[in-house]
Image: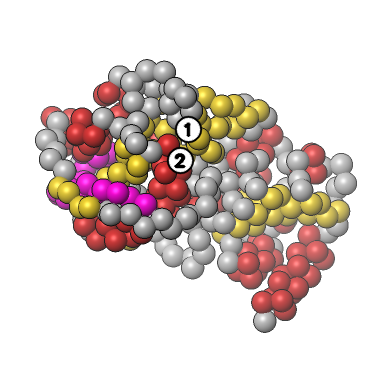
Amino acid sequence: MAEVLVYVDHVDGAVRKPTLELLTLARRIGEPVAVALGGGAGDTAAVLAEHGAVKVYTHDAPEYADYLVVPKVDALQAAVAAVSPAAVLVPSSAEGKEIAARLALRTGSGIITDATDLEAGDEGPVATQSVFAASFTTKSRVIKGTPVITVKPNSASVEPAPAAGTVEALAVTFSDQATGTKVTARTPRESTGRPELTEAAIVVSGGRGVNGADNFAVIEALADSLGAAVGASRAAVDAGWYPHTNQVGQTGKSVSPQLYIASGISGAIQHRAGMQTSKTIVAINKDAEAPIFELVDYGVVGDLFDVVPQLTDEVTTRKG
């Protein structure tokens, strides 16, 4: 069976959930071979093996922390040369998509971004995508070179499948471009205690109907009762009610959780483009004609300030 390279997204050896999802998808099309780079790379092996990695290539060097994405591209290019994989899978983060694009260019290969599913095909992996602001679903495959595919978080369930997880050192020679852009400072992300928006299994978002920054406490209370991330529409962000980092939509972040709850959001196409691939969508809006109701699985016509607190109380009661 052909090997499939999986780029490991980790923080000091702690593997992030989208990578484990990629290992599940990789097993559909071949044998997963993980590539872990930077500080703590060696500490990822046990978790990666538990989730199906037959082999784990590791490499650590100061360049991964001191410079932008090019050193990681150099390493993946070396891994491609060593393995000749059936595909390379990368998480669909901002950094991941840049790494994937540079790798595809380097290897003369086609690229598919923001895939939501992956399956084996007679002529190579077939990726499912939502396109044109999530109005259509397509199936595509790469016909040139080694397919490079980025996959959106929450596109697959994490499924443990113990494998050998043999650790091997990856030989990497950095290119002249690797040290071209130096990282001069880092600011740690402030912890909210909530899941990362793009990786969360549940997202609760508020829009123009929240009608003020202070009123987002209602949205946050429901999110916290569900262990969810908090999102916001562009209207809410532009009004200064919630940080831009939490914006969901075409000009914000794209999410694909198991459950998406939209409160006071009309459902403009720009917002729908960022959340329409959610598995289950619930909308709360007092306007029965709001466009959001066209795509939801469940809709509640009512004032969010009446509905959301009741929902929060019910969730808290059932959990208690």
Q: Name the element at disc 2.
A: helix
Say if 313 sits above or below 166 in the image.
below
Residue 180 numbered tag: none
Residue 11 appears anywhere in the view: no
**Residue 59 among magenta residues:** yes
Q: Position of residue 258 (x, y in %)?
A: 62, 53
Give the residues in magenta: 52-72
Residue denoted by label 1:
120
Count of residue discs: 2
**Residue 11 among magenta residues:** no
Q: Residue at x 50, y 42 (%)?
A: 152
Q: Position of residue 232 (x, y in %)?
A: 62, 51
Is 165 or 174 nearer to us in this picture?
165
Residue denoted by label 2:
28
Say if 217 sits above or below 237 in the image.
below
Contact between labelled residues 2 and 1, with CB atoms less than 8 Å apart:
yes
